[in-house]
Image: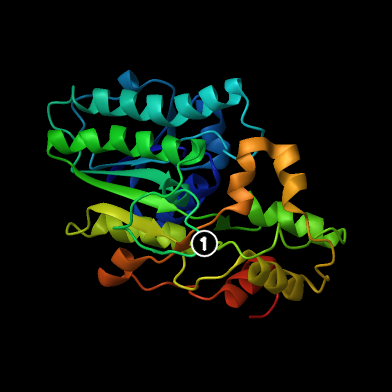
């Protein structure tokens, strides 16, 4: 397959490139830094502008994962604009370009996040659930998905992937938490009762590949493990895996003071279930947290 990938130099994109390397796919990465592609994704080609693509060579699929990290900095006005531009505006530009093609690709898989649901409290959620209290992160995901959905008018199969925090040792949430726990600074956040969806990197990659290969899969899919855990349970599981105690809970007021509205990413949560992925037949490699943590941290499961 000839696949155009945005966000290809990020955590998930690099893992996808590695996974697809042995399958003979022709990978093209649209990025602001195409010179990094040979190092990060050795067999892929980097482009800085969509117009660099030869219109005589059709694409089979587009995987749209681009977006500045949402939790790296406080949500200032400038940061909000950057997050919006790197997701909503980029996706609009991508779909507008797809509309100019004589033969658009068959499928667009576009990223989103479990934050689409807002803070769901204790409600059981799946792909048919409405969003809850809409913070900036939720509004961002809603607008992001709306731009991707426009590709349906081009006759494309559109998949919206609402991804939970990804467990991977080399980046993302787990790398930050591992450092804190190794310094003896780990603990639950707030009261620890907020639900915390998660997914192993291998399942994020596996689910994307599964959805790409199955023509009967379209619409919304939650990319999260079936096991539902609260923040306190996640914290204890991580502490047990690292053999470091979870001694220092972080009070909610301190997170709210330090992070402002962005604290909802840590103090809110979603009791989320990947119903559609399971109904379509995807089998999770790591459905349970203990094994997922053990695998990523390098200890026996």
Q: What residue is at 40 percent from the left and 62 percent from the top?
A: 206
* Of the pair 292 and 192, the residue shown nearer to us: 192
Q: Position of residue 239 (x, y in %)?
A: 76, 70
Q: Quadrant of the C terminus?
A: bottom right
Is 297 situated left or right of 182 in this image? Answer: left
Position of residue 60 relative to residue 24, above or below, is above
Is 162 situated left or right of 36 in this image? Answer: left
* Of the pair 268 and 14, the residue shown nearer to us: 268
Q: Position of residue 65 (x, y in %)?
A: 43, 41
Which residue of the protein is positioned furthest toward the bottom in this rendering? 301
* Of the pair 268 and 45, the residue shown nearer to us: 268
Reading the image, the residue beneath label 1 is 197
Q: What residue is at 55 percent from the left and 63 percent from the top?
A: 195
Mark 1 Cα shell of 10 Å, populated few (<14), some (14-19), many (≥20): many
Q: What residue is at 49 percent from the left and 35 percent from the top?
A: 67
Position of residue 36 relative to residue 213, above or below, is above
Is 260 situated left or right of 18 in this image? Answer: right
User: Looking at the image, how many numbered discs can be counted on the residues?
Assistant: 1
Position of residue 165 relative to residue 100, above or below, is below
């Amino acid at each position: 397959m000839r696949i155009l990938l945005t966000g290809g130099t990020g955590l998930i994109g690099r893992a996808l490139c590695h996974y697809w390397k042995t399958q003979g796919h022709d990978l093209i990465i649209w990025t602001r830094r195409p010179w990094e592609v040979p190092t990060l994704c050795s067999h892929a080609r980097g482009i800085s502008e969509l117009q660099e693509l030869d219109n005589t060579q059709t694409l089979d699929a587009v995987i749209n994962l681009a977006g500045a990290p949402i939790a790296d900095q406080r949500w200032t006005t400038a940061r909000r604009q950057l997050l919006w531009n790197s997701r909503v505006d980029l996706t609009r530009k991508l779909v507008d370009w797809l509309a100019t093609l004589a033969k658009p690709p068959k499928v667009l898989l576009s990223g989103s996040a479990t934050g689409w649901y807002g803070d769901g409290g204790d409600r059981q959620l799946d792909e048919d659930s409405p969003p809850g209290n809409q913070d900036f992160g939720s509004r961002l995901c809603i607008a992001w998905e709306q731009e991707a959905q426009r590709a349906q008018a081009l006759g494309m199969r559109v998949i919206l992937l609402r991804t939970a925090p990804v467990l991977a040792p080399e980046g993302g949430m787990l790398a930050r938490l591992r450092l804190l726990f190794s310094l003896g600074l780990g603990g639950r956040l707030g009261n620890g009762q907020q639900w915390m969806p998660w997914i192993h990197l291998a399942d994020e990659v596996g689910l994307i590949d599964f959805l790409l290969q199955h023509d009967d899969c379209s619409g919304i899919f939650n990319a999260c493990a079936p096991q539902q855990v609260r923040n306190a349970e996640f914290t204890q599981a991580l502490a047990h895996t690292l053999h470091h105690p979870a001694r220092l809970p972080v009070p909610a007021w301190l997170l709210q003071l330090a992070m402002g509205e962005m604290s909802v990413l840590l103090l809110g949560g979603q009791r989320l279930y990947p119903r559609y992925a399971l109904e379509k037949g995807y089998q999770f490699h790591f459905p349970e947290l203990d094994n997922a943590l053990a695998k990523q941290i390098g200890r026996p499961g």
